[in-house]
Amino acid sequence: MTHTWHVTINLFDTDDLKADGVVTKAHAVLTTSSGTTLNGYGRARRSPGDPDVPEIGEELASARALRDVADRLLKATSDDISQLEHHEVHLPQ
């Protein structure tokens, strides 16, 4: 049996909100084949002296959002196992 899970990453630059445009934010959404969703968030801040390369900020913010999703997925899994085993379970990260 094959299941497909989907991840969507939405990126937001602060230049939409402020003139400095040095922060990129990412919102990652994991949707399982059963319809369960997990959200993760990440951000990247460009130092004023760094060159303006938006792709780098997008990559870093996305990586952090995906890491957040992974951490939340591990927590959800340990909670599920804890309920089945009737004792607290901690999965290594």
Image (spheres, rainbow, N blue to C red):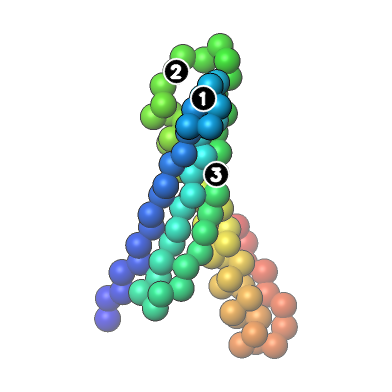
- How many other residues sit within 10 Å of disc 1, few (<14), some (14-19) or many (≥20)? some
**Quarter-of-image position of residue 83:** bottom right
Query: Which label lies toward us, 1 or 3?
Result: 1
Helix, strand or loop status at disc 2: loop
Q: CA distance from mark 3 to mark 2?
A: 19 Å
Residue 28: x percent and y percent?
Answer: 46, 53
Q: Amino acid at mark 3?
A: Gly
Quarter of the image that includes the N terminus = bottom left
Helix, strand or loop status at disc 1: loop
Q: Which residue is mark 1?
A: 21
Residue at 53%, 21% in the rendered image: 19
The answer to whether the residue labelled 1 contacts the one labelled 3, judged by CB atoms less than 8 Å apart, is: no
Q: CA distance from mark 2 to mark 1?
A: 9 Å
Q: Which residue is mark 3?
A: 42
The answer to whether the residue labelled 2 contacts the one labelled 1, judged by CB atoms less than 8 Å apart, is: yes
| Label drawn at residue 52 | 2
Q: Which comes sooner in the sequence, label 2 or label 1?
A: 1
Q: Which comes sooner in the sequence, label 3 or label 2?
A: 3
